[in-house]
Image (cartoon, rainbow, N blue to C red):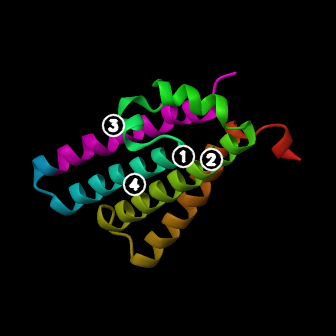
Amino acid sequence: MVDQAKRLEIAVVRPLDIVFLTSAAVFLFKGMWWWAAGCVAGVFYLGVIGSKLHPLQSAKDLAQGSVEGPAARIEQEILPNEVKQMLVLRACTRIGILLGVAGGFVSWGAFGLRWYLALTVALLLMLLISTLLKLPFRTEKSRR
């Protein structure tokens, strides 16, 4: 059985990291400092999400490889599946919050929506994204 935390990190966290880093580089190149700072903050928040996904690993262990290092194998054996699932579901919620806030700022700053409409977009995106991310990680036991 493939570890859920590993699946989430490879399928969602790493691609988002690349998207935020690439966006930051483009915004820096164009001189859009506030947008670049927002992307860098997003990268740091993704790092927090990733570190909370692996609670038994230190910063040194995470730097050596959060899903393939020796500490990752030990963590995979030690943590019960229920705890892993809880960590993954919380990470999905945090990713939904991150993308909702980012969508709200984009709808306000780039598309020119009023603040209250941008806030509504942000809240709806938070709910939608976190719910859609949680669907593939639910087990039969949690559906009851």
| Residue that numbered label 2 is attached to | 87
Mark 1 touches mark 2? (CB < 8 Å): yes
The prevailing secondary structure element of the residues shown in magenta is: helix
Badge 2 marks a residue whose secondary structure is: helix
* 93 vs 56, nearest the viewer: 56
| Residue that numbered label 3 is attached to | 18
Q: Is residue 47 left or right of residue 10?
A: left
| Residue that numbered label 1 is attached to | 55
Residue 9 in the image: above or below residue 110: above
User: Residue flagged by tag 4: what amino acid is it?
Assistant: Tyr
Q: Say whether residue 72 is magenta.
A: no
Callout in the foreground (4, 3):
4
Callout in the foreground (4, 2):
2
Task: State the extent of the magenta-drawn residues as a range.
Answer: 1-27
Badge 3 marks a residue whose secondary structure is: helix
What is the x, y in percent for residue 11?
51, 32
What is the x, y in percent for residue 109?
30, 66
| Residue that numbered label 4 is attached to | 45
If you read the primary sequence from the N terminus, does the residue marked by circle 4 or circle 3 appear first? 3
